[in-house]
Amino acid sequence: MNPTTDAARTEHLVTSLTERMATLTRTLSNWMQEQEHSLAEVEQHVVRLLKELGASLVAGLCSLAADPQPSPTVTCLCGHQAAYQRERKAQVTTLLGPISIWRSYYLCAACGVGQHPLDSQLQLCAGSRSQALDELLALLAATQDSFVEAATVLERLSLVHVSANSVREATEQLGALLLEHQAQPVAQQEPSAPARALSTASPSRLYITMDGVLAHLHERGWSEFKVGCCYHTRSRVDRKRPERLEIRAHSASYVTALEEAQTFGWRLWQEAVRRGVLSSDEVVVLGDGAHWIWNIAERHVPRALQIVDWYHASEYVWNAASAIWGEASPERARWAQCQ
């Protein structure tokens, strides 16, 4: 390749965007002087125009990744040579909005499969979304009540419009990848095999807690997700009550899955090993009293101190007080507080 070719393309991109920026600045200046505008109006107008300029910059940079003089042939996956056909345009929705990229198209006569080498290089799929946008869509879907709300929040934040179905698709694709990634160490871990995950440095005490959470799933109804958490604690004197120690959790990490308790136990064990359960001087397991929780604790961390959490322990005590003394008896509260 002629080394001056890349320099010429770069200068063309710089010149084009510089001219657009100058034109944009003049247009905005005239718009501002024509009539009064609030700061909010100025912000929104500038952001929208800069987003369009940014999309052009992204498209231009991606085009620089393509060879200015396409090779006549490229190697096909079948082992034969695919011949250059023509330039084809791909449209991709990005964090800055839709962009168009021209790239070379090759067709293999042996197997009939076509390919765009630039697509693989840039990791893009024509007619789809960028990976960065998909990650943001999945994050918003996880924090909003619906896919529609996630799409609305995205548009408010970035001025990029996508459909609710696009949010659903991006979320489910990422979810499938996460499930596949999480399932690998669990499937590899045999009950009799030593822990294979690398143990990290850990303070003297590691806390492990788990619970079941009901969620209403599409086409499945109410189902229980298993949720586990590993964390450490730090203590400090309570500011309002100096005679007491205030204990706070920190460095929490979570695992969750829709699966049976036995399989979930191995998943949580993998995370506990990663968090240093094998090198901790003390391990504490907290739960609400459900049998499956203590079964997991006995199987994976039999040396752990098992504690029923304060909320559920208190609930059991008050239920017992009501059964013994009755709801209206003054002895009920005195007995419960004593216990």
Image (tube, rainbow, N blue to C red):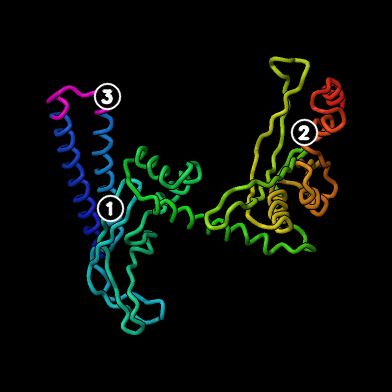
In the image, what residue type sits under mark 1? Ile
Q: In this view, does 166 lie to the left or right of 5?
A: right
Task: Tell me which secondary structure the magenta stretch mostly adopts.
Answer: helix
Q: Which mark is residue 315?
A: 2
State the SS at label 1: strand
**What amino acid is labelled 2 in the image?**
Glu
What segment is highlighted magenta in the picture?
Answer: 31-41
Residue in the image at 38% along x and 54% along y: 130
Left or right of 47, for residue 198: right
Please tell me whether residue 318 is drawn above or below residue 222 in the rendered image: above
Amino acid at circle 3? Leu
Which corner quadrant holds the N terminus?
A: bottom left
Is residue 136 shown in magenta? no
Left or right: 242 as drawn, with respect to 53: right
What's the CA distance linking mark 1 and mark 2?
A: 58 Å
Circle 3/circle 1 CB separation < 8 Å: no
* Precedes in sequence: disc 1 or disc 2: 1
Q: Which circle's residue, 3 or 1, is located before the other in the chain?
A: 3
Q: Residues within 10 Å of mark 3 (few under 14, many from 20)?
A: few
Residue 194 at what x, y percent from top left? 77, 60
Reply above or below: 86 against 292.
Answer: below
Q: Position of residue 160 (x, y in %)?
A: 32, 44
Q: Which numbered disc flags the more N-terminal residue, 2 or 3?
A: 3
Pick the residue in front: 312 or 335.
335
313 shown above or below 80: above
Q: Circles 1 and 2: CB distance less than 8 Å?
A: no
Residue occupying the point 32% across, 61% down:
126
Question: Residue tagged by mark 3?
Answer: 39
Marks 2 and 3: which is nearer the front?
2
Q: Which of 98 and 278 is in front in this view?
A: 98
Q: Where is residue 209 in the image (x, y as percent from the top left)?
A: 72, 43
Query: Which residue is under mark 1?
Result: 99
